[in-house]
Amino acid sequence: MAKAEPQSRRQTRGAVLELLLRRKGAFRPELSAGTALTDVSVWRIVSELRQEGWVVESRKRAPYVGGPSSFFTLSNDHAVLGVELSNGRLSVGLGGLDASVLQSWRCAVPAEPDQAVFEARCRELLGEALAQRGRRGLPAVQAAVALPGYGGPAHRRNAIFPWDLERLHAFLRQCLSPVPVALTNSVIAQAAYDRYAIGADALGRDHLFVFVGHGVAAAIVSAAGALDAFAPVEMGHAVVQRGGARCRCGHHGCLEAYTSLQAVGEIVGLDEASLLARGDAWLEPGAPGPRELAQLRDRLVLLGLGIGNALNLHGLRDVVISGWPSLLGPEEAAAVAHGIDESLLGGLQDDVTLHFRKPGTGSDPGASVAFAAWAFARRGGVDSPEPAALAA
């Protein structure tokens, strides 16, 4: 995908801020090359951002002889807030503009809490986070809320996310006003975490990001789309077995019904909470055994079928897979590839590459903090957020 040159003031500032977020700092020539802006424009924008306190300048050895020594990074004098609901836990984080988590607060909630329970717990944790923000003297400039099943601005109420959106927006305004709030789907937040918090942007190409956990979801990540980097892809509720296992969405045979942590737990004899608590330990030698591994490979073939069909629709040639499949060995990775080969037009050839990324289990609310940092960069540090920022 070709890099489009930013046009408006918000876009040009946003392009510079996003690149600094992604690369954790840059020299001026790198900012010009990475944003498709002239050196004069970059200097004007960086000067503006420095005066406003969003960017700081330091001296660093130039990457080549005679090169500039001015190195620009995001300021650590401001904060973002992240709220994340995942795996039976509500998490709130206080973070920096660079997507780092400064402090976090967590509490257990039902796996699929009703809206009243979420509001009560969220109000408590946000109160603690905002109090800590005040003690640190950090103005909050952006907040983000990541929720499973949320469908974006055109969201349709469903069994995964049945909440009243108007009520949710009113609640968030009440708790966080005047801080701008970006609402997003959990997988988009995970993709932002992968891109900005753990430095996985070295791929440098458009790709399909797939996360397999409590649910199964995917997102298209645009390498060139600094301001429109993420687009959700509905994959977990694609039916792969007509009349098959019942899914929590109410349908039968969904990919999620076979590959979610709950489904995996039924194979290895552990519930979802135990799998999450053990982390990599559930893959100790001899556990799971040969019989269980064979069943897991069958499930991973189904995952590959779903991924292959997504690639047919979107024409991508790189896939990043995070979640429990990335904890397994080469034979299990081959099962995913086999499924893709069966469903991808033309089969799995050398031009399609799979990248397995270990999940950040226990890293919540890192994903929502990373998304909040991106949402701030996306609006260019301008006070009033774009209308779409509330529902990205």
Image: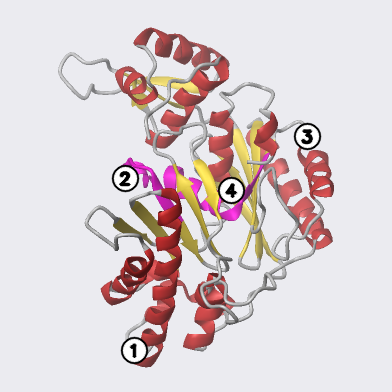
Q: Earlier in the sequence, mark 3 or mark 1?
A: 3
How far apart are the alpha carbons under marks 2 and 4? 22 Å
Where residue 199 appears, as percent x and y from the top left, is: 38, 45
The reply to whether discs 2 and 4 touch (Cβ–Cβ < 8 Å) is no
Is 133 part of what is drawn in magenta? no
Q: Earlier in the sequence, mark 4 or mark 1?
A: 1
Q: How is the image coloured?
A: secondary structure
Q: Nearer the viewer, mark 2 or mark 3?
A: 2
Q: Secondary structure at mark 3?
A: loop
Where is mark 1, residue-wise? 286
Residue 240 rendering spot, x and y as whole percentages: 51, 73
**Mark 3 and mark 1: Cα distance apart in space:** 52 Å
Numbered range of the magenta stretch: 182-209
- Mark 4 lies on residue: 368
Q: Which residue is mark 2?
A: 203
Within 10 angstroms of label 2, few (less than 14), some, or many (20 or more) residues? Answer: few
